[in-house]
Structure formats: C-alpha cells, structure tokens
Image (tube, rainbow, N blue to C red):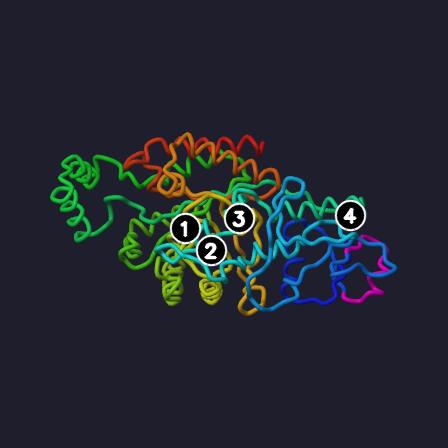
Amino acid sequence: MLLIFVPKLTNRLGYTINVVMRNILQTEFAITVDPDTFRNHPEAKLCYDSHPLDNCDAIFIKARNLLFETTIEEQECQCFEYNGIPVLFPCYGRNTELPFDPFAAIFYMISRYEEYLPHRNDIHGRFLATESIAYKNGFLQMAVVDRWALMLKDIILKHYPDTVFSKRIFNFVQTIDIDSAYCYLNKGIFRTTLGFMRDGLHRHDKEMVRHRMRVLRGKEHDPFDTFDYVIELNQKLPNRFSLLFFALLGDYGIYDKPISSYNNEFRQLLQHLGDYAKIGIHCSYYSTDEPDRIVRETQRLSEILHRPIVRNRFHFLRFNLPGAYRNLVRAGVTHDYSMGYADLPGFRNGTCSIVPFFDLSSDQESDLSMHPFMTMDTTFHTHMKLSPKQATEKYHALVDEVEAVGGTFSCIFHNQNLCEEFGWEGWREVYEDLLEYVAEKLK
C-alpha cells in the first residue's frame, strides 16, 4: 500500500489525494502527518511537502501552497510544457520528481477554482470557455488532469514496481436532452394556434403549415419524436454503452418550452424511456437562480417515474458555483452532468473521470458527483458552424483522447436535432458514426 506523507492534512489536500489515488488511479493508499510512521513504512512511500524528509528514501513531490490555504485568490500557476504535456504550478528543486506540483494543478482544475475568481460571463451568465486557463493555453481538448495523474502513476511504478493499480477502462456515456419531446403534437390549443399563426402569417411558410397539419392529423410522424430511433440503435450496441435522458419539466417561458408535465402522452413517453435508460431532470433556465424550481421539477419527474430523481443537467448549461450545486444537493440530487461548455468542446474541469464536487467557499467536499461531458451537438452545429464531416472529425479526436487515458467519453445530443430537418440534415449520420466509432473501440 502507498503511504503519503503531508506536513498538514487540509480539506483541500485530502480531497485532492482521494480524487487522484481513488477516483483516477484506483490504488490503495493512506495518508500520514507523522514522520516516524512514514519512515518506518516498508512499502511504497510518497512525500508531498516543501522539502523532502531527512533520512527517508521516498518519492518526493515538491508542494506549492495552494492546498494548504483556505482563501480564494489569484494564483501564480504559469503554464508550460513537460514531456509534451501542458502543466501548471511550476515547482523546481533538485530532489523533486516533477518540475510542477501535480496535486495543486489537479485541484485547481477539478475544483473550478478560476470560476470563483473575477471573470467575464456570456449573455446567459455562463462562464465562457474562452475565459478558461485551458483555452488560453491551448489544452482545452486534452484530459490534462488524467494525464497528470498518470504521470504520478509512472513515477510510483518506477520506484515501487509492485504497487497495484486497477486498470482504467474506456467507457462511453451518451446523453439525450429532451428540451421538447414534440415539434407539433401535445402542445395544447393555445401553443398550436400560435404555431399556425407564426408559420402562416409571420413566416409566410405554407409548406410548414401543411407539414404541421399533416402531423396533427396523424398522417406524418412528429419530427422531434426520434426516441424509437435512438432506442433501436442503442439495442444493437455493446453493454458498455450507457444511455441517459434528461427531461425538461420547467414552467413554460422564454427559454424553456417543454411539453406540459400533465400531458398523458408525454408522461407515457417518459415512463417508456425509463424502461430502457436512466432518466434525470433537465433543470430549467432559471433554476440556478431560484432553487425552489429544482425541488418542484424533480418532484414532477419523480411523480411520473415513481422513483427518486438523483441526476441532473442544467438547461442551457446555465449554472453558477457553488450555489447551483449546493441547491442540487438540498433537492436530493447526487449526480450532475452539466460540467462542460456550450461554446466549445473539451474538458471544462480537465478530466474525463467522475469526481466529487469540492465547494471552495465552504472548504469542504460535497455529496455531489460531477460527470463531465466533452461534446454537445449544438456546440458544433450552432456555435462553431461546423459541417457534419467536420464535426465527425472533432468527435473522433476527442474520443481518442479519452481512450488514451482510459476515461469516460460523455456527449450530449438532443432528440429534436436528430430529426434530419430544420437545418440538421446530415447529423443523424454524425450520431451513427460516433456510435460505430466507439463500438469498434469497445470490442
């Protein structure tokens, strides 16, 4: 077993070591602050301090101050390359194994430290990818946290080759956000009438009016109802594929336009999907500002599915730290899938591993697990204006990066964007290609 010596065990430090050794590297370890216990340990030893212990043969990683602090302030975490990998928090010394502090760097990324500092938000109040240290230093599309952890693993094995690490296995999680289950159906008289008026009077689009009428009369399939297509496709895939749906059940508004949670056909659809996949709540646009909405919306979904709701993704990926995550925990939600960017693909918290959330403001680990995602269909189509072929290349590159570190590739699609209409022609092929590309790797 690996024993790690630290001069002082803080909440930040204990959390970071747990994430690295348990969540990512999956090895047995213990932490001590007693020098004699450390010196007498007969197996693998790692000293994390500002200087190595005297009269002790052990791996030494020189520590910066970040994990021994409780304040939140600007950090000097200059980025440079080491063995071709961007790293943060340079730390030089004759005896240290690495020229940077991997624990401080990992904590800075996974805690989203920079999101607590002054920064510029977009029009929806979201932290922008372009504001991040990862984007500014060109490593947004690299799983640096996992790579830094693997550097530590290599060093440990070099000094203590008998140390046992569980093998990391590449996994795939696809998630489908249900912003609106139907394009025309089940919207009620008022919304349906407005739809006809918008198409006929405002857009002067007679074909759209006819299309809407044919669907309402049952002569054509509702274009947003792509759920059978998704399920049938997934039933042909390996067992290591995971499928999750996130249902928007907020009140109707400017940014939230779901089907009513009282609509019987929609309720039956959600129950049907629950037979094939896990379902979480897609907390509405204003839920990050009004925590009562989180409670109300999770209760709606729980009442439909007859089970507790423990998974969430915020609509529009609109959330703030730490408030939104605190509110999820209060509502009984223990898994969040919002950790990613709307404007660019990549690794918002630097990792493709599931890690617990650390609340910097209260200086403690939360009961909430963060499930980061790497890509979203609207990012490529709407924000980046990529063609289906260009998007496919981006998907492949990010899947390859995640596979290289044995992580979990997670992506977002929307049911309405798989309709092959309304400017999304060719994107079913992107979706199918991604599933086939991953399936080949999981064989």
Q: Disc 1 versus disc 4: distance between alpha carbons?
A: 40 Å
Numbered disc 4: secondary structure:
loop
Is there any visible trace of residue 266 in the rendered image? yes
Q: Is residue 45 magenta?
A: yes
Q: Disc 3 versus disc 4: distance between alpha carbons?
A: 32 Å
368 vs 221, nearest the viewer: 368
Q: Nearer the viewer, mark 3 or mark 1?
A: 3
- Mark 1 touches mark 2? (CB < 8 Å): yes
Q: Any mark on residue 147, and which?
A: none
Left or right side of 297 for 59: right
Q: Nearer the viewer, mark 2 or mark 4?
A: 4
- Tell me the amino acid under the disc marked 3: Ala
Q: Disc 1 versus disc 2: distance between alpha carbons?
A: 8 Å
Left or right side of 150 for 125: left
| Residue carrying label 3 | 134
Residue 254 quadrant:
bottom left
Q: Decide which of tag 3 and tag 1 comes sooner along the chain.
A: 3
| Residue carrying label 4 | 163
Which region of the structure is painted magenta?
A: 33-46
Say few, some or many: other residues with alpha carbon within 10 Å of mark 4 (under 14 / 14 to 19 / 20 or more).
some
Q: Disc 3 versus disc 1: distance between alpha carbons?
A: 28 Å
- Tell me the amino acid under the disc marked 4: Thr
Numbered disc 3: secondary structure:
helix
Q: Disc 3 versus disc 2: distance between alpha carbons?
A: 27 Å
Q: Disc 2 versus disc 4: distance between alpha carbons?
A: 35 Å
Say few, some or many: other residues with alpha carbon within 10 Å of mark 2 (under 14 / 14 to 19 / 20 or more).
many
| Residue carrying label 2 | 311
Residue 330 image point, x, y percent: 47, 67
| Residue carrying label 1 | 246
